[in-house]
Amino acid sequence: MSRLAVVGGGWAGLAAAVELRRAAPHADIHLFEAASEFGGRARGLEWQSPQGRVPIDHGQHLVLGAHRAFLRLLDDCRAACSQDPGSTHAFVWHCQGSALHFGRSAAPWGLIEGGIQTLADQIRGKSGGWPWAWQAAMLRLLWTAQQRRWTTSGTVSELLESLGQPQGLIEALWQPMAESALNTGITEAPAAIFLELLRRTVAGPRDSLAIWHPQENLSTAAVAPVVAWLRARGVGLHPRSRRRVAELRAAGFSGAVMAISPRHRPHTLADRAPGTAVPHPLPEPRWRGILTLFLLRPTGCEDPGRIDIVHPAGVGNIPLVRLHRPPGPWGQVEAWVASALPSREQPEAVADIRAQLRALALQRLESDGLSAEYLFEHHDPLATWACDNDGTQRPWRLPLPTNDGPMALRWAGDDGAEGLPATIESAVLSGQAAARALLSAVG
């Protein structure tokens, strides 16, 4: 019987462990995670506010219907343990008093459905108008994105300019959307990956742009059912267990999926088998930080019925969104997220952005008559990486060893899915592919 390991209990590792168990029901499989909980950077937290317990996440994560591999994994595991399926909401983009709705039907009908809702809001005076020229330009870009045989090189800004997108539309929609997803300014971000994201989301099948959100947090609604599924099927689960490649080889494992962040790979590869050629130090990505401020609306002060994405101006030259989480007994949480921050190279710039974002959030609190004590901050300086315009090669991931003596190795992580930026979806896809490749290698 094969003895297989997965190192790293984030979403790449969880997906790899599930894939291994499905394909090898009699193998001896073990999942090792250095932290005390599984889920990696996309797990839940508990905020002890003056109002009591408030479930939030390790930074705000946006899960769309287009994240089909993640949602399919979750549905399969959740069916075995009767977990709350969470809720889905239509996608609404707010910018400077104007709202743009995206319907839940498949493209192009979802765009038409959303356009009707946007027009209805304008007629009723609920929001400002999106100029017809902007909407026509948006449809032109999305029509281009749907042509799957059409490819492009260059940057997002070059693509937008070549398609004649109005500057106002770029600033109100495309720039914050692209930079939030790719964690890179549009003058550097690759147009090819941006187009692929549009094909999967705005120009995708039904509910591709619907927002899924757990009623509590990701640990309760997503991590817990996957962990329960693995435990029920005999997978060894080992939190607080850091494992190096050499330790796995010595323990008799015939193969391992290394589902770990690039910054932990040098440590994991320490004491590897002689003759394994790995550059040292391993090249690292251009790290980007994410800062999240959570504001709490008391019970009775919710903004009911929807989750909004907002791009207000005035906080540096960075993407900024505000997301309303589903309300619960604790009230309703607003998450203000500044993404694509410089990680550690420019501490003064990060401090300035933090101060501006906090001031903007507190201003919103005061306008709603809430106290400044309802504020929680989460900052991860190494949350993600810049999706530079360098084709599909990510040099910090290659070359990595595919064996260590007699033990086969495969690597996974949110950097492991070519053509996609760092998301839960890319981590799941990478973990599943690594598990299949490992099983092929060990026979």
Image (spheres, rainbow, N blue to C red):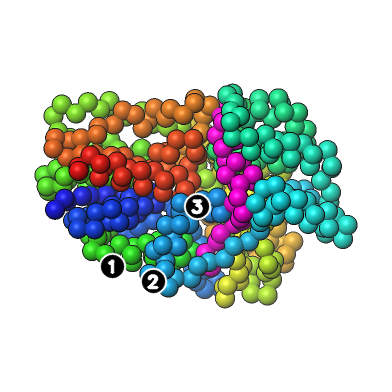
Residue pictured at 42% horizontal, 73% vertical: 82
Q: Are marks 1 and 2 in contact (CB under 8 Å)?
A: yes
**Mark linked to residue 81:** 2
Residue pictured at 57% horizontal, 65% vertical: 87
**The residue stretch that appears in magenta:** 188-216
Residue pictured at 28% horizontal, 67% vertical: 232
Question: In screen coordinates, is 126 left or right of 406?
Answer: right
- Displayed quadrant of residue 295: bottom right
Amino acid under disc 3: Arg
In this rendering, the answer to whether 271 lies above or below 80 is: above
Q: Is residue 201 magenta?
A: yes
Amino acid under disc 2: Cys
- Marks 3 and 2 sit apart, C-alpha to C-alpha, by 20 Å
Is residue 435 in view?
yes
Q: Characterize the local packing of mark 2: few (<14), some (14-19) or many (20 or more) Cα atoms within 10 angstroms.
A: some
Amino acid under disc 1: Ala
Q: Is residue 396 magenta?
A: no
Whole-percent x, y for residue 320 in the image: 63, 45
Of 172 and 426, nearer the camera is 426
**Mark linked to residue 232:** 1
Q: Secondary structure at mark 3?
A: helix
Residue of label 3: 68
Whole-percent x, y for residue 344 in the image: 46, 36
- Marks 3 and 1 sit apart, C-alpha to C-alpha, by 24 Å
Residue pictured at 83% horizontal, 58% vertical: 120
3 or 2: tag closer to the N-terminus = 3
Q: Characterize the local packing of mark 1: few (<14), some (14-19) or many (20 or more) Cα atoms within 10 angstroms.
A: few
